[in-house]
Image (cartoon, rainbow, N blue to C red):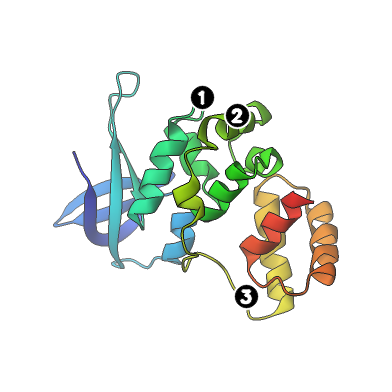
Amino acid sequence: MIAALRGAFRGRSGEAIVVDVNGVGYEVVLPPIVEQALGPLAEGAPLDLKIAYLATRDQPTPVLYGFAREEERQFWLLLKSVTRVGPRGAARAMVLPINRIAQAIQEQNTRLVDSLPGISAAGAEKIVATLRQKVAGFAALEETATARLPSTDDELKRLAVELLVEMGIKRPDATRDVARLLKAQPELRAVEDVVMEYFRQ
């Protein structure tokens, strides 16, 4: 079993990155929120990842999933345990900080959960029903560096719209609604705050 990898970035292989550890290249799948936290990766950039090692009877070839923090790995394990979500679905869905996703589950905000990439309406209902009583610890986590705090209003609007489009919202609708939301609540400064409020309306 592999629990952690410390090495250097050596490029990409399909949906995975390649981490070089003492001359051995490991393919590691990163959830979007982890890629965002790491930022642009240059050849040779140092990496220190928590790893979930997955090999099953249906998929005997091992797959490594990488995380910046142990809490992210634990949340992924919980999310993938829900029927028909699975490991890849759980990784794809992690486009928001885990405390924000956990808060949406606690609030039974199936509209937001349904909008996570790879999660269907039925899947959102199942996630909320299965995990609502299990995510309090994740919901209470302090915000981390993965929260985006743009320096200008225009950048805040752009990043919020891009994230909503990634979550399946049509760009014209996202552009219009984000502008309206920020006009009504100018105190919103983090991209994730804007998205959470969008799905609470």
Q: Quadrant of residue 64?
A: top left
Q: In what element is the residue under mark 1? A: loop
As measured in the structure, the alpha-carbon distance from the residue carrying label 1 to the one carrying label 2 is: 7 Å
Q: Of callouts 1 and 3, which one flags the residue occurring earlier in the amino acid sequence?
A: 1
The residue lying at 26 percent from left, 62 percent from top is 8
Q: Which sits in the foreground, 179 or 64?
A: 179
Which residue was labeled with disc 3? 150
Query: Which residue position is annotated with label 2?
Result: 123
Q: Position of residue 176 (x, y in %)?
A: 85, 60
What amino acid type is highlighted by mark number 2?
Gly
Q: Amino acid at mark 1?
A: Arg
Between marks 3 and 2, how big is the CA–CA gap? 32 Å
Q: Position of residue 133 (x, y in %)?
A: 51, 37
Q: Quadrant of the N terminus?
A: top left
From the viewer's side, name the closer residue of 199 and 26: 199
Q: Which residue is depicted at the point 66% across and 38% down?
A: 114
87 vs 6: above or below = above
Q: Residue at x 75, y 47 (%)?
A: 169
Secondary structure beneath dot 2 equals helix
Asked if labels 2 and 1 touch by Cβ distance under 8 angstroms, the answer is yes
In the image, residue 11 sits, relative to residue 40, either above or below, namely above
Residue 67, can we see it? Answer: yes
> From this viewpoint, is residue 12 visible?
no
Amino acid tagged 3: Pro
Kindly identify which residue carries mark 1. 84
